[in-house]
Amino acid sequence: MTNPCPACGPDFVRWLKADPVRETGWLALPRRWVDVGQVLQSVGQSLNGVWFVEQGLLRSYFLNTDGLERNCAFHAEWEWAGMLPPRGVPVVAEVAIDALERSQVVELSHAGLAAWLQRQPELQATLTETLLVTLMGSSRRESALMMGSAEQRYMHFLAEHPATFERVALHHVASYLGITNVALSRIRRRIKDRQASLALSGQAKARVD
């Protein structure tokens, strides 16, 4: 599997299906369809589930007492959403998760995940590494929010998630970047003007040459 996240992406699914026992265990896991706007996890509820997106798009977001939302992650096909606490440790969700598109997800409770790993123990190391990759990604995002400019965050998002960008409304992108819709519009206009200026300069240079 070549994906930086060992339990994400089409390579992970192909790996599961390459072995009949693994494929049978994977196909036996519970699945459900989620409509647009349907909430999978609410802020304040007990953490007890994770979801693997087979089709569609989810988002994770913070929600304050005034109802202000701040997106913190998007989850497209072959990505996980949610987090499970250590067994026996009661933890409430700090982020909500809902669907931006009609989505089909594999839904795993704490008990369901434990049962899956008991049947497929070779997955333990893969899922543990996936958790570490997820934590590293969260650390990089926190660093970008603290140290990078809004334009740098926008350009990084475009570079890292070009397909997701095409599917997400701009106000959701602005929320993810931690800026207003107006600020995002200004950034996009500034970049467009700069690109146009460079194109004109290149045309002028070509005429001179």
Image: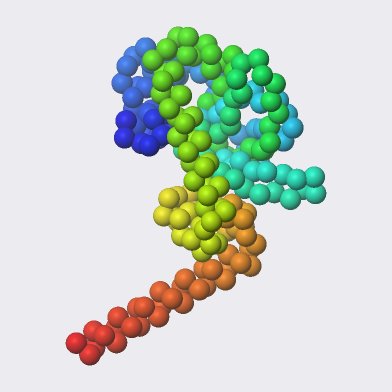
User: Is 9 above or below relative to 158?
Assistant: above
Q: Residue at the left extreme?
A: 209
Which quadrant would the C terminus be assigned to in this image? Answer: bottom left
Q: Residue at the top extreme?
A: 119
Q: In x, y percent, where is residue 92? A: 71, 28
Q: How many marks?
A: 0
User: Is 110 above or below relative to 10?
Assistant: above
Out of 103 and 143, give the one closest to the viewer: 143
User: Is 124 above or below relative to 142?
Assistant: above
Q: In x, y percent, where is residue 88? A: 65, 15
Q: Residue at x 55, y 47 (%)?
A: 142
Q: Residue at the bottom extreme?
A: 208
Q: Residue at x 53, y 62 (%)?
A: 149
Residue 195 visible at all: yes
Q: In x, y percent, where is residue 95? A: 66, 38
Q: Residue at x 52, y 68 (%)?
A: 188
Relative side of 10 to 208, left or right: right
Q: Residue at x 61, y 16 (%)?
A: 87
Query: What colour-coding does the image apply?
Result: rainbow
**In the picture, residue 198 is in which quadrant?**
bottom left
**In the picture, residue 183 is in which quadrant?**
bottom right
Which quadrant would the N terminus be assigned to in this image? Answer: top left
Relative side of 100 to 92, left or right: left
Residue 79 visible at all: no
Relative side of 206 to 1, left or right: left
